Image: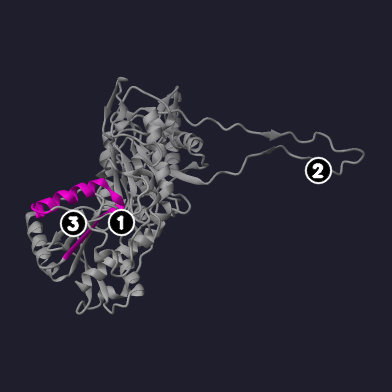
Amino acid sequence: MKSSQSTERLRSRRQFLENVGQMTAVAGVTAVGGASATGLIPSAVFANEDSGPVDCGPPPKAVNSTRTGGEGFAPLPLPVTPLRRSEQKRPPAPPSLIGKLALGDARFIVKDGKQTMYRDWMTDPADVKTLLDWTNQKLGINYRGIESDVASFSYDPRELPALLVAGHNKFELSDTVRESLKRYVLDGGTIIADACCGWKDFTDSFRHEMSLIFPQQPLRKMLPDNPVFASYYKLNQQFTYKRGDGSEYSAEPTLESIEIGCRDAVIFSTADMTCGWDGHDHDRGTRMTVDQARQIGANIVTYMLGTFQLGRFLSTSKIYHEDKAPSRDDFVFAQIVHEGDWDPDPDAVHNLMKFVKENSTMEVKFKRQNVQMKDPAALTYPLWYMTGHREFTFTNEDIAKLQQFVKAGGIFLADACCGRQSFDTAFRQEIRRAFPNQVLQPIPFDHPIYSNQFNIDTVEYSPRTYEDFGPLDRPELEAVMFDGKPGVIYSRFDLGNGWEQFPHAYSYGLKDRSALEIGANILVYAVTH
């Protein structure tokens, strides 16, 4: 009888713990293998042998309480003064910067002889706090991390600029959460993701979820000239990693990102960063060393702060009424669609055309049209414009169309968005393929392009350009000339950021006015020649 009662109490206790796990689980997040039937609230399951580790790091240190003792006795002669109660005094909380997303099913383990509930995101409970404590000290800022969950989170970047998604196990998001995360990122929020201990299950799940949320913007390896590697610490391309046996080795960074405009809006590390942020080692997985993880963590924080307002700016959709207008008798500014990130400054061309209209006497109506080089209609436009951050390759058909376009009198204008080296290298290589007997050469300062609308003797560059390239003050346009006329015009430094007329903290490019004047002169030259 006693045995039966004990079994019943154990069953009842287990059911209670499972119910608690369900109540505290996050709506919309399901760990694969223990999913609830509804797919909305994860069911609580007991940890099994193929789940990830559950004890990566210690919890955050407790905050010391400061208490002031109350008065034990009222003033004499009469007890008319109320007794003061002891009060906990805390300074105002700093603003929240990163929210750690509650993720995964509730699971149960036996730890120190006690059955304990945990969820996958809890395995490094102090990572964000420790990173921000360290970063606040290094950068002279004051931010804090908080815990977030998809059920109650507002998905408003103004309230919480970044979310950290970290764990070991497989997981799956609901369609509702996917749509909310997409809106959050497009509104200017940042997702930071970390495969704790380099766990493959988490890596596979995160990549799959991002492919569903951003099908047109894949996760891609961060390029060496990405500003995340230099926003605070100037990091080289050999990171230091540690294996489970304690041995260290050097390899390229394992960071990937999804780019929204000129911003890395999703940043993902396939090798563990969060254990390093927390400052501990253990005998499993692949991770960055503590110093390496904290340095790249500080860079990510700095980068986020430097691009937050840009993200908010890019979230605003602008409507251009002339886009739908007939193209007859218009000057069509054809933006080339290519295999790289071909439209990082979506408002740039429209702002340039507006500037030309307001600052010239030309009666021509300008219009932007997105085209591929192989499109038959592309040869009917007088000017092609191409930009991007990343490397690309022209097909043989693209090369033939470009040769045909330029020899017919068209002008091919291009700039390296944000002054990125990867695009610059690719562009020069492809132009050599297209015109092997020609070379890109500086446009002489007495050329009409520098004087037909605005007299351009000197230009201003972005602060980052001066920091890394020195005191430049002359335009740096290059061209491939055909009978004295530029058929290809190229700027190693960014023009589009300036046309967009919003600060880009990490751009190597011209300031707004200088970029707009150069762009206007090129348009006037294209119209009149």
List the residue tagged with mark 2: 82
Specify whether residue 430 is painted magenta: yes
Q: What is the three-letter code of the residue carrying label 3?
A: His
Gap in angstroms between the C-alphas marked 1 and 2: 75 Å
Q: Quadrant of residue 522?
A: bottom left
x and y percentages locating residue 192 in the rendered image: 36, 43
Whichever of callouts 1 and 3 sits on the residue coming sooner in the sequence is 3
Q: Residues within 10 Å of mark 2 (few under 14, many from 20)?
A: few
At mark 1, the secondary structure is loop
Q: Main secondary structure of the magenta part?
A: helix
Of the pair 498 and 251, the residue shown nearer to us: 498
List the residue tagged with mark 3: 338
Asked if residue 180 is positioned above or below residue 359 in the image, the reply reads: above
Gap in angstroms between the C-alphas marked 1 and 3: 27 Å
x and y percentages locating residue 393 in the rendered image: 14, 51
Q: Residues within 10 Å of mark 3 (few under 14, many from 20)?
A: some
Residue 41 visible, this angle: no
At mark 3, the secondary structure is loop
Residue found 44% across the figure and 22% down from its top: 113
Q: Which residues are magenta?
A: 411-438
Tell me the mark number nearer the camera, choosing from 1 and 2. 1
Is 527 displayed left or right of 472 in the figure?
A: left
Of the pair 446 and 261, the residue shown nearer to us: 446
- In the rendering, which numbered label is found on residue 475? 1
Determine contact: label 2, label 3, CB under 8 Å: no
Specify whether residue 130 is painted magenta: no
Q: What is the three-letter code of the residue carrying label 1?
A: Pro
